[in-house]
Amino acid sequence: MADWRVVGHEWAVSFLMAGLRHGRTRHAYLITGSQNIGKRTLAHSLAAALNCTHEDPAQRPCWQCRSCKWVLSGNHPDLIYAANDPTTGAIRIEAAREVMRQLALKPFIARYRVAIFDEFDRAAPRTQDALLKTVEEPPPHAVILLIAQRSEHILPTIRSRCQVLPLRPVPTERVRQLLIERGASDEQATLIARLSSGRVGWALQALEQPEVLEDRANILNLLSEAVRGNRLTRFNIAETISAEASKDRDALRYLLEMWQTYWRDVLLYTHDAPVKPCNTDRLVEIQQWAQRIPRKAAFEALQATRRTLYQTLETNANVRLALEALMLAYPRY
């Protein structure tokens, strides 16, 4: 069998391989799932398999032929990427139209011209609508791969014409075994696997790039500073975070998600739950918080963090005001 370099989503690989084997390739696929869960890896492996020149279809992608190597290098002449705006991360309508124009051309050397739209759920409805004509009446040589965290933000007219592949979190033990295979110690693999929330991409980044765990430590230290600080300290923290969020909204998502895991761990300890915590390297502090923060207050802090995550990323709420409200909702240590 071909190696699609995808971990934990074997069902999706099997489904796509069966379609390729029986000539049932769809003209559009929508790959959804949380950040760093493996969406881009699956999309690029599918693009490689579509144009791989290996004589045995079951061995595609082979990663040895010229076409597969071009996909790996990002220089395949028939693989088109929609450019995301460097400021907002969204795809502009001009970029979408340009990709559709290129997709209408015949392939230079391959069987298919493949277009990849990353973070497609961030695109405005008007931009998404620019794809509709091509999705409804696609050229026979064209395949569109849409990558998104959530399908709800994609127009129903687009979504209904795609083969949707929802990627779910990978089991913790599966991630842990992968990390051990990549050279992690048992303790390190256990910590990263639990922190990953089933996101293989994040787990591998944390293993290979020490700064990932350093950033996490700084984020949790900031939470500790807020819980121990007075109102002025908390508002200063909210101002700092909101300033960073104006430049990088993904950083805000990451911070609030990490804070969620911490409050979850504290809440587990207040209930003496048998479930193991995520932040195993900070058990002493978690236990101290669980002893001094009432169970109800820990639960309300977790709920407030979840609410702020939704407000700042899914609505037009003022980020700084939402963060200040969150700071006021947190208990004092």
Image (cartoon, rainbow, N blue to C red):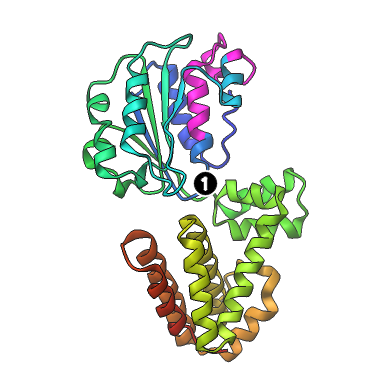
Name the spot of residue 314 as percent of width and height, x first.
Answer: 34, 59
Q: Could you tell me which residue is drawn at 57 percent across and 70 percent down?
A: 275
Q: Quadrant of residue 6?
A: top right
Dot 1 falls on a residue whose secondary structure is loop
Image check: 94 left or right of 217?
left
Give the vertical position of 38 relative to 310 (above or below).
above
Indicate whether residue 46 is drawn in magenta.
yes
Indicate whether residue 113 is drawn in magenta.
no
Name the spot of residue 295 as percent of width and height, x first.
Answer: 49, 86
Q: Could you tell me which residue is drawn at 42 percent across and 81 percent down?
A: 300
Pick the residue in front: 301 or 70: 70
- Quadrant where the N terminus sits is top right
Q: Is residue 24 visible?
A: no
Give the vertical position of 131 relative to 22 (above or below).
below
Give the vertical position of 1 relative to 172 (above or below).
above
Q: Could you tell me which residue is drawn at 73 percent across and 43 percent down?
A: 181
Name the spot of residue 118 as percent of width and height, x first.
Answer: 43, 38
Pick the residue in front: 298 or 322: 322
| Residue wearing tag 1 | 37
Give the vertical position of 281 relative to 182 (above or below).
below
Report the number of numbered marks.
1
Kind of residue at disc 1? Ile
Pick the residue in front: 201 or 274: 201
Pick the residue in front: 123 or 277: 123
| Mark 1 closeness class: few <14, some 14–19, many ≥20 residues within 10 Å | many
Name the spot of residue 100 as percent of width and height, x first.
Answer: 32, 24
Instruction: Give the magenta part as a residue range.
Output: 42-66
- Quadrant where the C terminus sits is bottom right
